[in-house]
Amino acid sequence: MSEPRGPGPSPEPEGDREANAEPPRDLPPPDLLEALRQIADTGRAGAGATWDAVKAFRTLVAADVSLARNAAGRAAAFSAMAVIFGGTAWMLLMALVIVLLSRGAGWPWWLAFLACALVSLALAAFGAWRAVYYFDLTRMKATRRQLARLGFGELADFTPAPGSPAPTRTAVQSPETPEGRPLKDEHGVELTPP
C-alpha cells in the first residue's frame, strides 16, 4: 500500500524528468566539418533561392517581351488602319458621296466635301488612338519597374528597396521632386516612368 501524500507536488515519472531536464550548457561547439557542412547547406539554399529568383525574373521578361511583340504587331495593324482610312477612304468615297449629297440631297458642294472629310478624320482618329494604346504596351513597364527596384535604370533611386512591401508601381507613376516638379537625369532630361 502506498502512503498518503501531502500537499506538495506529485513526483514525476522517471521518463518525464529526463525529457524536461535542461540540456547541459557546456556542450562543445560543433566540429569544423559539421560547421562546413552547415555553411555548404546554407550556400546551396541561397543559390537555390537565387536560381528561383532568376527563373521568375526570366519568366517576367519573357512575358513582357511577348506582350511587347504582340502589342507592336497590333499597333502596326491599327497604324495601317489609320493610314488606310485617313487616305484611301477619302479618295474612294469622296466622289460617290459628294455626288449623292450634292445632286440627290441638294447640298452645296462644300458641305458635301466637309461631311466626307469629317467621317474620314473620325476613322483616322480612332485608328491613331488605338495605335497609341498598343504602342504604350511595348514599353515593358513591369520589367522596367523590377529592374528599377533591383537598382538598375534611371528610376532606381526613386523606387522602394527590394525587401520593402511598398508597391513600385505607385512610386514610379509620376516621379517628382519634393517641390512637385518632374525629376530629371544628370543631362536635364525628364525621367520617363515605366
Image: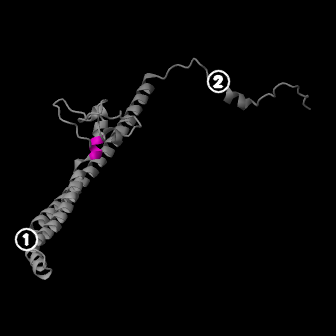
Marks 1 and 2, the one that precedes in the sequence: 2
User: What is the quadrant of the N terminus in the image?
Assistant: top right
- Which stretch is magenta? 141-145
Q: How is the model colour-coded? A: one colour
Taking depth in this image into account, of 20 and 190 the one nearest to the observer is: 190
**Residue found 50% across the figure and 20% down from its top:** 29
Taking depth in this image into account, of 167 and 30 the one nearest to the observer is: 167
Residue furthest to the top: 26
* 1 or 2: mark nearer the eye: 1
**Residue 187 in sight here:** yes
Residue furthest to the bottom: 104
Q: Is residue 140 above or below residue 119?
A: above
Q: Is residue 63 above or below residue 48?
A: below
Q: Decide if residue 73 is on the left or right side of residue 24.
A: left
- Find the distance from the CA under tag 1 to the CA under tag 2: 95 Å
**Residue found 21% across the figure and 60% down from its top:** 74
Image-quadrant location for residue 109? bottom left
Residue 105 % position (x, y): 15, 80
Q: Which type of secondary structure does the marked residue at label 2 adopt? A: loop
Q: Which type of secondary structure does the marked residue at label 1 adopt? A: helix
Q: Is residue 19 above or below residue 98?
A: above
Taking depth in this image into account, of 123 and 11 the one nearest to the observer is: 123
Tell me which amino acid carries mark 2: Glu
Residue placed under numbered mark 2 in the picture? 22
Residue placed under numbered mark 1 in the picture? 91
**Residue 69 in sight here:** no
**Residue found 30% across the figure and 35% down from its top:** 150
Q: Decide if residue 61 is on the left or right side of residue 35.
A: left
Residue 119 % position (x, y): 17, 68
Residue 39 % position (x, y): 40, 28
